[in-house]
Each structure stands twice: as structure tokens, then as C-alpha cells.
Image (spheres, rainbow, N blue to C red):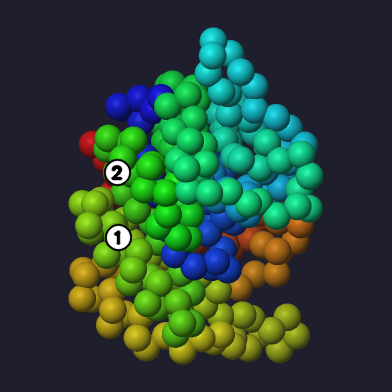
């Protein structure tokens, strides 16, 4: 069960491929190391549970103590609960009905030891299905929503859906992280804009939501995911670390109670 004092933040994208899981992994790691907070990650992506691999702990298992599931310890103050720890063959597709999503979600929320955590970060599923809706029913207070998006035109409607979803549940939107905005040529150092982005600011202004950080495409992020080592641990001197710290600061500022 999640303590009342624990701050809960949902990470939304409503679309695959925006880098949401990579973002939640690195932000959580920063909170645990740079800000010395005790952080739990709740991986709600049951069909593609990549977070165990991103952290390099895919061969670990969640334990049981006092009839409670125990999240896997990544650092002394960073823990992860994921359906990926229960898969016996990771090559097989995950197939389940809505009632199974509901039961697994209830186990992760009600029957998992989340005591004494400062933050719970939720990797929310891309679709608003039974798992996500059960989470909304079972967690009494959610402090904020962080939306991860790219500026590709096709993702704009998904970003708007995420904002509307948060508004329907009266959850404050911390802001939008615009991911993969450009790429720098390693030879000539010229910057190439990857997407047209004129429409994003227009949509966000309708809902009084701001872009809190713009993240460039960085090949080292892909390398860190493949290695199973968080980017901020592998590439501590990267300029991108400052971008991630800015996101952390905004979360801290917006979810104060």
C-alpha cells in the first residue's frame, strides 16, 4: 500500500516511441542519487515491460515478505516493481485480458510494500485501459502528471489526450517534456530539427500547460538502454544531465504539499 505522505507522479505519453520509459528511469535515478530521495517506480506497461532491462536487472525477481511483494532494489533508495520480473520467457508476447490487468495492478498497489517512500513514479500505459483505470481508482491522491512527447504532428493529438485525461481526474499537469527535438551532426556540428513543431505550443496554450524541457536526440541514450545502465550513470559529464536535472527541479517544485 502507498503511504499518504508519498508523492505520486504519473509519466504519460499516450503513444509508444516517445522515450517515456528511458525518461522515467533517468529521472528516478537522479532523484535517488542527486536529491537523496527514496523512489519507487511502478511499471504499468505490462505488455512491453522494458524498465528491468533499462536498469540491467531483468534477471532479478520480486520477493515476498510478510505477505507483501517487495520491489526489486536497484540502489539503496531506488526500487522497481514490474511485470517484467514475472515473465519466464521474455521472447513470448504478453497476452492478457482486462480483468488480468486489473488484478495485477491491484497487487502492485495494494499488496506491494511501498512504505516510507518519498516518491512513486508510475510508467503509465499508453492506452487508458483496465490497468490504468484501476490505478486511478485505487490511489487516493496523485500529485501530478508529466507528459513525454515528441513534436511529430502525429503525436500532438496523443499529447492533447493525455492533458484531457489528467484534467478529467483533476490531476495537475506538471508540464510537457519535448523529447528528440533535434540532432547535432557529429562532424559539422550543425543542428537538424527532426520535426515540425509549430502546432505544439498552440495546443498547450489552450490548456495552460508549458513545455518544461526540450531534450535533443542523443545516441548515448540509446547506448545506455542497450547496456542496461542509466544514462546519467554512464555519461555523467553529458550536457543532457543538466536537462534532466531541470525536469527534476520542476517536479519537486510542482508537487510540494
Q: Position of residue 70 (x, y in %)?
A: 58, 23
Q: Residue furthest top?
A: 66
Percent x, y of residue 101: 50, 44
Residue 54 appears at what percent x and percent y? Answer: 68, 50
**In the shown orientation, is residue 60 left or right of residue 23?**
right
In the figure, 189 relative to 160: above or below? below
Residue labelled with disc 1: 165
The reply to whether residue 49 is in sight is yes
The kind of secondary structure element at disc 1 is helix
Give the answer, above or below, for where 212 lies relative to 235.
Answer: below
Q: Is residue 106 left or right of residue 95?
A: left
* Nearer to us in this view, 155 or 107: 107
Please report the residue visible at 70 percent of the width from the left and 30 percent of the height from the top. 61
Q: Position of residue 140 (x, y in %)?
A: 27, 35
Image disc number at residue 143: 2
Q: Is residue 232 visible?
A: no
Amino acid at each position: 500500500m502507498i503511504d499518504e505522505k508519498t508523492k505520486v507522479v504519473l509519466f504519460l505519453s499516450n503513444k509508444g516511441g516517445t522515450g517515456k520509459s528511458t525518461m522515467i528511469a533517468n529521472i528516478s535515478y537522479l532523484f535517488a542519487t542527486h536529491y537523496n530521495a527514496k523512489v519507487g517506480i511502478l511499471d504499468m506497461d505490462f505488455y512491453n515491460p522494458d524498465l528491468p532491462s533499462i536498469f540491467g536487472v531483468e534477471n532479478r525477481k520480486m520477493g515476498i515478505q510478510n505477505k507483501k511483494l517487495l520491489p526489486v532494489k536497484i540502489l539503496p533508495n531506488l526500487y522497481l516493481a514490474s511485470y517484467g520480473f514475472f515473465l519466464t520467457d521474455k521472447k513470448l508476447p504478453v497476452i492478457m485480458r482486462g480483468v488480468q490487468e486489473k488484478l495485477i495492478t491491484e497487487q502492485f498497489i495494494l499488496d506491494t510494500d511501498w512504505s516510507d517512500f518519498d516518491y512513486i513514479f508510475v510508467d503509465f500505459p499508453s492506452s487508458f485501459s483496465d490497468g490504468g483505470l484501476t490505478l486511478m481508482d485505487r490511489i487516493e491522491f496523485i500529485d501530478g502528471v508529466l507528459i513525454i512527447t515528441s513534436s511529430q504532428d502525429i503525436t500532438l493529438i496523443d499529447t492533447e489526450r493525455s492533458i484531457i485525461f489528467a484534467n478529467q481526474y483533476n490531476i495537475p499537469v506538471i508540464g510537457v517534456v519535448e523529447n528528440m527535438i533535434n540532432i547535432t551532426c557529429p562532424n559539422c556540428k550543425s543542428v537538424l530539427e527532426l520535426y515540425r513543431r509549430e502546432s505544439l505550443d498552440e495546443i498547450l496554450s489552450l490548456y495552460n500547460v508549458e513545455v518544461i524541457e526540450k531534450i535533443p536526440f542523443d545516441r548515448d541514450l540509446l547506448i545506455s538502454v542497450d547496456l542496461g545502465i542509466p544514462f546519467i550513470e554512464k555519461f555523467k559529464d553529458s550536457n543532457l544531465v543538466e536537462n534532466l536535472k531541470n525536469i527534476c527541479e520542476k517536479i519537486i517544485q510542482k508537487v510540494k504539499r
